Amino acid sequence: MSFYIFALSGFLGGILGGMGMGGGTALIPLLTIFCGVGQGAAQGVNLLAFLPMSLAALSVHAKSGLLEREGILPLSLAALLSSGGFSLLAAHLPSALLSSLFGGFLIFLSVFRLRAAVFSREKSKHR
C-alpha cells in the first residue's frame, strides 16, 4: 500500500512542479502527513525529486517559449548560494522547528495569494 501512497504523492508533487509552482509545496506535506516521513527527510527527498521534475518542466516550458532569460544568471547564482547555505543550516535544526517554519511559510503564501486574488477581483469590478 505504501508504494501507491508514495506514487500518488509523487504524482501530485509533479503536477505542481510541472506548472512551475514548486512540487515541494505538495510533496513535503504529503510525505510527512500521509507517509510518516520526518520533516528533514521529506525536505531531502523533495530536493532529490526536484531534479528530474525541474528538468522535465524546464524542457517543456523552453519548447513552448515560456522562459524569460533576462536576469537568469544572478537569480540562479543567488539561489544556488542561499540554498547551499540554508541546507547546511537546516541539517542542524530540529525536525519540529523545520515543520513549524515550513508550515508558517505555507500559511504566509496562502494569505498572500488570497489577498492578491481578492484585490485582483476588486480591481476588475471597478473597470
Image (tube, rainbow, N blue to C red):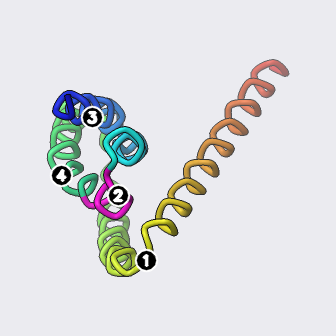
The mark closer to the camera, 3 or 1, is 1
User: Which quarter of the picture shows residue 113?
Assistant: top right
Residue with the mark numbered 1: 93
Give the left or right position of residue 70, taking residue 110 as reference: left
* Residue at (42% x, 43% y) in the render: 33
Of residue 55 and residue 4, the one placed in the foreground of this image is 4
User: Which quarter of the picture shows residue 65?
Assistant: top left
Label 4: state its secondary structure: helix
Q: Position of residue 11 (x, y in %)?
A: 25, 29
Q: Residues within 10 Å of mark 1 (few under 14, many from 20)?
A: few
Label 2: state its secondary structure: loop
The quarter in which the C terminus is drawn is top right
Q: Provide the residue span drawn in magenta.
A: 37-44
Residue with the mark numbered 3: 14
Is residue 40 in the magenta section?
A: yes
Q: CA distance from mark 4 to mark 3?
A: 11 Å
Kind of residue sitting beneath label 1: Leu
Q: CA distance from mark 3 to mark 2?
A: 20 Å
Residue with the mark numbered 4: 51
Kind of residue sitting beneath label 3: Gly
